[in-house]
Image (spheres, coloured by chain):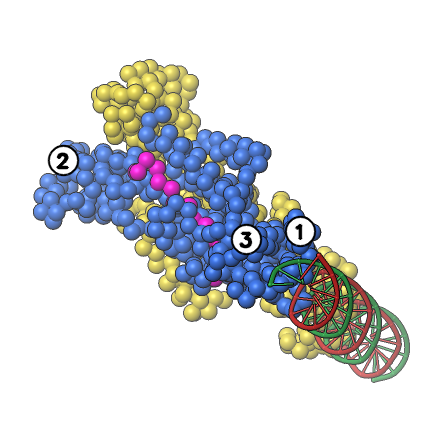
Chain colours: A blue, B yellow, C green, D red
Amino acid sequence: MDLGDRKKQILRAIIDDYIQTAEPIGSRTIVEKHGINLSPATIRNEMADLEEMGYLEKPHTSAGRIPSELGYRFYVKSLMREWQLSLEETNSLNQAMQLRINELDGLIAEVSNIVSRFTDYTVVATAPRAVNPTVKSIKLLPLTQRSVLLAVMTSAGVVKNAGIEAGTAYSDEAVYNFSKSLQAALLGKSPYDLTEDDFAALKNHAADCIMLYSPVVAYLFEWFDEDAKTNVYSDGVVNILNHPEYRNIDKAKQFISFIGNRDNIHSIMSDGDGEHIKIKIGDENKFEELKDCGVVISNYDIGGNLRGSIGVVGPMRMNYSKIVSSLELITERLDLIINKMFFNE
Amino acid sequence: MDLGDRKKQILRAIIDDYIQTAEPIGSRTIVEKHGINLSPATIRNEMADLEEMGYLEKPHTSAGRIPSELGYRFYVKSLMREWQLSLEETNSLNQAMQLRINELDGLIAEVSNIVSRFTDYTVVATAPRAVNPTVKSIKLLPLTQRSVLLAVMTSAGVVKNAGIEAGTAYSDEAVYNFSKSLQAALLGKSPYDLTEDDFAALKNHAADCIMLYSPVVAYLFEWFDEDAKTNVYSDGVVNILNHPEYRNIDKAKQFISFIGNRDNIHSIMSDGDGEHIKIKIGDENKFEELKDCGVVISNYDIGGNLRGSIGVVGPMRMNYSKIVSSLELITERLDLIINKMFFNE
DNA sequence: TGTTAGCACTCGCGCATCGTGAGTGCTAAA
DNA sequence: TTTAGCACTCACGATGCGCGAGTGCTAACA
């Protein structure tokens, strides 16, 4: 399992090259392109070894070698060098992140777009979610005779609101009283903190506008439901067509359909076990549809209050190095922006 | 320009056939598949005429004929027969429309999905927009010390709301008073009805919470701005890959990118001049990217209060007849559902 | 013992060739 | 006016072939 330095150097050269060209690399190419002072024959011997060890594959007898799935894994774990984003690249990224957006959903959509354009792969993302959120403010507001507005601000600074059709008319006073009871019961807490008794009491207080009780509670749980499908985004799905692995229409169709399904995206993101950046290659993905793909997920965590993920999906032959650098830069900026957005200037 | 009955019959046969098979039709095929009591030679003569008139084209000398752009236009205008959705089809559509959704955005997204699955083409849609909306209810509600919620219900029953970061703290009373002034000024009107003087007066009344004035006005105009980009949706983009016209990866890429841009979708929908169903073929589309495409737009209008559009985009060779029938059925159901959703039970 | 030159061998790819068959237009007869 | 007959066209798929990049093996060399 332990590779000699020369083998490592050759393996790295092959993978680096293949990531760029998508074409099998022959022994001669390695000698020429990468400054290795050995004859092609020697390289051939080493390559035969690497193939036997499972790091390389031959598409057919007379082609060069390409990395195997195992080869990629070894590469991202031990061989990959940090990608130096050029100054222009860094600048253009920073510039693109000068967002004049002041609402979370738009922000994530915009960031997904930036990353997909920048990496030329498909990007998936989930909107940041509050960690253990509590109610910071809750109000009921009569809108018309027959409808009220429920507005909640969570501890993470996220505002949720919804109109409720009351069915019958209620006095402003009844609504106001119910609103007060909600505040008394919920401020500083999550609806999951309340006992059945608490809810029973609350229902009592809502006696004068009882039709509002159920919708209010339903919305509260919906907003605080940890398992709820949060908003997911994707962008640059079409980028997959830029890569030769997906010249095949049926493969492309399968990929695009798969990513088009929100549940799948949600599921891709959800097993990032809190690691900062997680790379999954081929069979490491739990979806059959991604068995030829690479996935890089970055989980960010803002001030311990908001958590979200942004991921890059593409063929197994991806520029992992550049993706990791870009995601790191992006999540760093994102942290700054969201902090500014929610927690004072 | 006026075609004899026989020519019409032949042209219709060719186009119907081509829509189904995507392959050039020869004189013999016409005689065999469609019950026409003439010899292939006669058909050939007629086809030569139709070609000269511009309704048909030859991909090359020894293939059959395919419809020209002009041919398609003539077809949808004069030749196309009403498509009879089968009972199963109608049922499955009706069943799919049993939506348990009670919010506009989700509804449109769901309907787009249904139509795209049903027709096997790409669907674009805009969320319904109010026609000449006025303010039915407007309130400002303190959320926390430093943020307020602006809630507006329009005459069409649509609720808009937004949190405003106040910057500095205001008394509940100041906010309440400003809220009252807003009501006095705006109830039953649109912000576009107010004069400069009205706004000046309003600003005066907001003296105690002057930082709120600008954002409130900005939101109002945003919400009532007819030209504002409304929410647009698309679904089934990947369906384009099911059609042989888009076996070519580059064409597919161009199409998918084009549809991926929200501005383009908005623009596609926006020139439906109030006609109920509008079909645009090839060059009739103002976008270069759609010059090989057909577009069917259905503009629906619910109770004179809400207007929206749903459209189907695909290759020029589309099953226009089935699309039109489906869209008609769908918009009819949509009318029912939205009516139920907003205006009483 | 590790490295390298030499060499025969493999095999995918691009290219040219060619027969097939569907379809056409024209002409002349019904 | 319609149709049978016929020569002609041309895309398409199959076949075959040469090229060249790349390999593995062997034997010689440092």
Q: Does residue B219 appear left or right of residue A162 in this picture? A: right
Residue at numbered disc 2: A184
Mark 1: few/some/many CA within 10 Å (<14, 14-19, 20+):
few
Tell me where the magenta segment starts and ends, as one range: A291-305
Residue A331 seen from this side: yes
- Residue A310: x and y, percent? 43, 45
First in residue order: circle 2 vs circle 3 = 3
The residue labelled by disc 1 is A37
Q: Give the secondary structure at mark 2.
A: helix
Q: In this view, does B242 lie to the left or right of C5?
A: left
Chain letter behind tag 1: A
Query: Which image quadrant for residue B26?
Result: bottom right
Q: How many labels does the image show?
A: 3
Tell me the quarter of the image containing the N terminus of chain B: bottom right
Q: Which amino acid does label 3 sit on?
A: Asp
10 Å neighbourhood of mark 3: few (<14), some, or many (≥20)?
few
Residue located beneath label 3 in the image: A5
